[in-house]
Amino acid sequence: MTLYKWFMTFLKEYLWRVIIGLVMSTVIVVLAIINPQITGQIVDRVIDGGEYGILPRLLLILFLATLFRSVLRFFYQMVFETCSQGIVFKMRDVLYRKLLLKDFRFYNRNRTGDLMSRQTGDMEAVRFFVAVPIYAIYENVLMFIFALVMIFTIDVRLALAMLTILPLTATASYFQLKAVKPAFHKIRESFSSLNTFVQENISGNRVVRAYAKEDYEIEKFSVENDNFKDVQLKAAEIWTKYVPIFELFSNLLMIILMLYGGYLALNGQITLGNLVTVNGYLWMLTMPLRFCGWWINDIQRFVTSLEKIYATYSEEPLVQNLSIPLTKKQFEGNVVFDDVSYSSDNEDIISNVSFSVKKGQTVGIIGATGAGKSTIMNLLCRFYDVSDGRVLVDGINVKNIDLYDLRSNVGIAMQDTFLFSDTVEGNIAYGTPDCSFEEVVQAAIMADANHFIKNMPEGYDTIIGERGVGLSGGQRQRLSLARALIKKPSILILDDTTSAVDMETESYIQYQLKNLENHCTTFVIAHRISSIIDADIIFVMADGEIVEQGSHEELLDKNGYYALAFRNQYGDFQHRKH
């Protein structure tokens, strides 16, 4: 689907309203023809001809035409404003829904500020184009044509003289359009960059203040702000250069009328009333010329913003459902990695990983930062697709399973804990909104969060700040764990979930996990040996490969990476288990 066909899918719902609006605009232009005709007749028939009896009738027609035009203008402006709001409402909704379906790869490559600018500044440019320039351009082009036709009916020679301005106008319009297109692209890029910078610094305000980097960030903001100002000024230089040219062309029409039209009137080739009538049409010719430069800017701003929005919308995620995916509401939790490899941007992340986990088992994964631990779980959840090999859940390739069903069966407490600006209860029940309050409390108890929640001002109804502001790292982790546990998943993934809690809390959580009613398959990614010491099987990863595997005792006997990590954390090698 092309850019403009996509835009038409939103416009077609309001097409009849737009057509009605354009019809009303056409009527307004037709009524605008009446006034010069009436003034011409007043000069020829009343002032020169002495037909004073028709003056009241002519003045009444003049008044009614003006009144009717004003009423129509109010209604058709409301029509276009309503259409613009409706179109952008639909477009914003469609884009937001599509953004939620994008995969991790998309968000890795796109900055939050850029995506926010699609939903704000770019959407506003589209809305404004539908609300104003569409009818303004149509109306003024129509006025120019109608006025020129009426001048032809009065005197062909005068009309042809005025037509000499058109080639000059078309040439200037072409060069302005050519120059302003890249300028608007730079404006949108700079606006996105500025938006991203502000968003990041507001979100990271505590880090900025903790390191006393306010002056540094202000300097960086000044650079971004200056750059945005510069691209705006450079774009302004383009249209400020062309707007006076169009103004000159409109004034040339007045000169042609005064010189050539006056010459024809003095020689009796046209009447004085004809000259007044043509002068009445003159504004219908000059206004389109004067505003031509501004309309080119509006059109290009609309096109640039629409291109940005469509580019974001049309990028398809690599991770997608099959046309007819396999649906399964409840999984047992058997997991197999069959010679799995994954690479991104020509870099191997994991290579030839194979293992088998039975339902109900607890698996520990340990390794240095960047070893590929979290990637293993991302492939299991199909946040990314494998480059080679297969990931199987209950013997079924995850690529064949409906994404919703797969992820509904997985509870994950991510390494990067994210909490919404909502109540404590709303955050815990986020994945299971139909759960009871008792289930929320039970999940909080299992995550050892109930006691600090009850001490909050409004307990479970306490509103959490953005991203969990106001909570400690351990509190955020426990709420994230509760959110995963309340799903009662077949597969539970804990990605360094207890790194910010004390040893006593960690032991309590591990005890609760062992006593889960459904006893799900559990993957625990950790740097702390204590988090995985009781796992049924432990995988040690390095450089994207599993280099060691076995139970805690077996890995100690191998005297490899795991044994070294154990000695570093516990000191005395002989204390093998707590």
Image: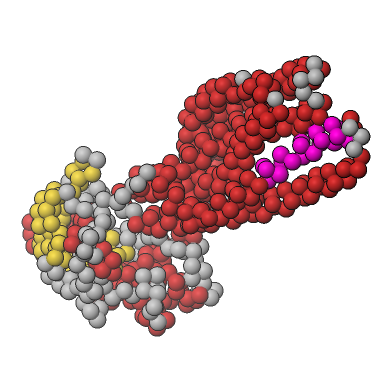
Per the image, is 39 magenta? yes
Q: Closer to the camera, 511 or 380?
A: 380
Q: Closer to the camera, 236 or 565?
A: 236
Which residue is found at the position 21% from the left and 64% from the top? 325
Instruction: Tell me the quarter of the image containing the C terminus.
Output: bottom left
- Report the number of discs: 0
Instruction: Give the magenta-colored segment's residue range.
Output: 28-46
Q: Closer to the camera, 489 or 514?
A: 489
Res 158 quadrant in image: top right
Which residue is found at the position 77% from the left and 46% from the top? 66
Res 415 quadrant in image: bottom left
Q: Magenta span: helix, strand or loop, mainly?
A: helix
Q: Can residue 58 be seen in this view?
A: yes
Residue 210, placed above or below residue 505: above
Residue 365, placed above or below residue 208: below
Which residue is found at the position 15% from the left and 59% from the top? 391
Which residue is found at the position 51% from the left and 53% from the top? 15
Per the image, is 418 magenta? no
235 sits to left or right of 500? right
314 sits to left or right of 270? left
84 sits to left or right of 51? left
195 sits to left or right of 243? left
Q: Provide residue 208's location: percent of width, then percent of height.
A: 50, 46
Q: Provide residue 501's location: percent of width, then percent of height.
A: 35, 65
Q: Can residue 578 be seen in this view?
A: no
